[in-house]
Image (tube, rainbow, N blue to C red):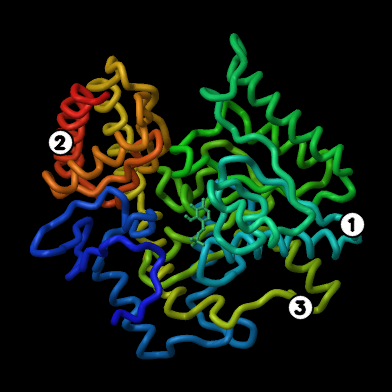
Amino acid sequence: MNNTFRNFRHKFLNIEKAEGIYIYSNRKKILDMTAGISSFQILGWNNNFINNAIKTQMKLFSHICYKTFNDKNIDKLSNILIKNADHKLDAVYYSGNSGGEACEAAMKLSFLTHQAYGQKKKKWFIGRDQSYHGIGTDAISIAERPGLEIYKSFFSKFRDRVSQNHYLYERYAGESEEDYSKRCAIELEKKILKLGPENVSGFVGETMMGGLIGDVEPSKNYWKYIRKVCDKYNVHLILDECYCGLGTNGKLYCCDWDKITPDFIFVAKALSAGYVPMSAVITRKKYEQKILDKFGRVLHSTTNQGHSLGIAASLACQKIITKKKTLNNVNYIGNYMRKVIKDELGDHEFFFDVRGRGLRFSFEYRCKNKNQFGLKLKEIMFKKHHILISGKWHRVCFTPALIINKEQSDLVLDKFVEEFKKLSKSWH
Ligand SMILES: Cc1ncc(COP(=O)(O)O)c(C=O)c1O
């Protein structure tokens, strides 16, 4: 009898080893375009530099209490995460292991900051439709992901949502992108006014809407207009960059494309690239000072926050990610792959859109039984070519590791375009 309680009933592939962007299973070498299915293995597997950093740390100590002791790597990592940003945030809080934990930490830090400034009533958080921020109760109560409604009884009362940001889907006939962005900001403003500005703590959104809807870049100046509304009502702007941040989008932070400074950014996946679970919240030193002045401590902690092996792994990862060479590769391969897909399939009757930033991008198609089409395409790519892609719903999402090279991306493109054309011919 198997004693493991799993999330699904399907047959699980045994993985024998993984190296770079390849996983090895049943003597097959599989090229992974998903970075580990949920887009975390962004520097590939078995990277010597990262492995050695973890081993070195292990010999010193595996973990020390974040609330009591200092591990010299912590400040080094914080410094890298701050000095390579265009935004003006200047403090990093290590929240725990997962993105969901980081989301909840950001919400609690926002709440505590307002409390410390005497804004006692600010407890509402506003999220957006078609979003996901993790599986913790607070994270799901501001998100909208199919199936999560089942947990409605867990949700806090003080949560609300506005529309997603998706120009192609949501624009009015003849509406410019800029006007659409303004309309989104007005919707947020109306929501804040309805709840009462004195009651609203923060607005939470993925800087670029992610894998659920398929890598939708923010519409023109969207974040600038949203920032203005948040400033007007003293509402914190909290950005989720678990999926789109830390190099994956072609810059260290995705919001640096949008030239804004939020109040909080939370990151996970790419922070330690799957080597050791790790997450963090990037925010302002003045908030830390204010909370400590008022309460004497941050009333939020977990045993494994700032885990020393996670910090060592993250430090090594961020040293690689912040190299010019890495970010140049992300932008070069991402732009190249989107261009080839557009050139090859742009006139195809199923083509709807190809979009995204860096190596977070999606190809959206329109046809009958869309979900089945994506799943079939994924199956063909896997069985015939040993290439793992994420195809489902209405899109194929490409989130390869940042180290993918031109030759590997050409192989994927050749097979993908060929199989897409073949399958669509016989698709009803
Ligand atoms: C945008 C986004 N935010 C948060 C999370 C949650 O991260 P974790 O699964 O580490 O809790 C995810 C995970 O897929 C995500 O895509």
Q: Which of marks 3 and 1 is nearer the N terminus?
A: 1
Image vertical order of residue 46 relative to residue 163, above or below: below
Work out which residue is located at the far front of the displayed protein and give it: 1
Q: Can residue 115 be seen in this view?
A: yes
Q: Which quarter of the figure is the N terminus placed in?
A: bottom left
Confirm if mark 2 falls within 8 A of ligand 1: no
Work out which residue is located at the far top of the displayed protein and give it: 174
**As shown in the figure, which amino acid type bears the numbered disc 1?**
Lys
Give the residue pinned by disc 1. Answer: 121
Place residue 96 in its image quadrant.
bottom right
**Label 1 element class:** loop
Neighbour tally class for label 2: few under 14, some 14-19, many 20 plus, Cα within 10 Å: some
Q: Which quarter of the figure is the C terminus placed in?
A: top left
> Looking at the rendered structure, which numbered label has been put on residue 415?
2
**Label 3 element class:** loop
User: Residue at point 83% right, 73% down?
Assistant: 293
**Label 2 element class:** helix
User: Residue at point 67% right, 60% down?
Assistant: 138
Left or right: residue 340 versus residue 303 is left
Q: Which of marks 2 and 3 is nearer the N terminus?
A: 3
User: Residue at point 53% right, 61% down?
Assistant: 99
Q: Which of marks 2 and 1 is nearer the N terminus?
A: 1
Give the residue pinned by disc 3. Answer: 297
Q: In this orientation, which residue lies closer to the viewer: 397 or 90?
A: 397
**As shown in the figure, which amino acid type bears the numbered disc 3?**
Arg
The span from disc 2 to disc 1 (Cα, nearest Å) is: 56 Å
Image vertical order of residue 274 relative to residue 360, above or below: below
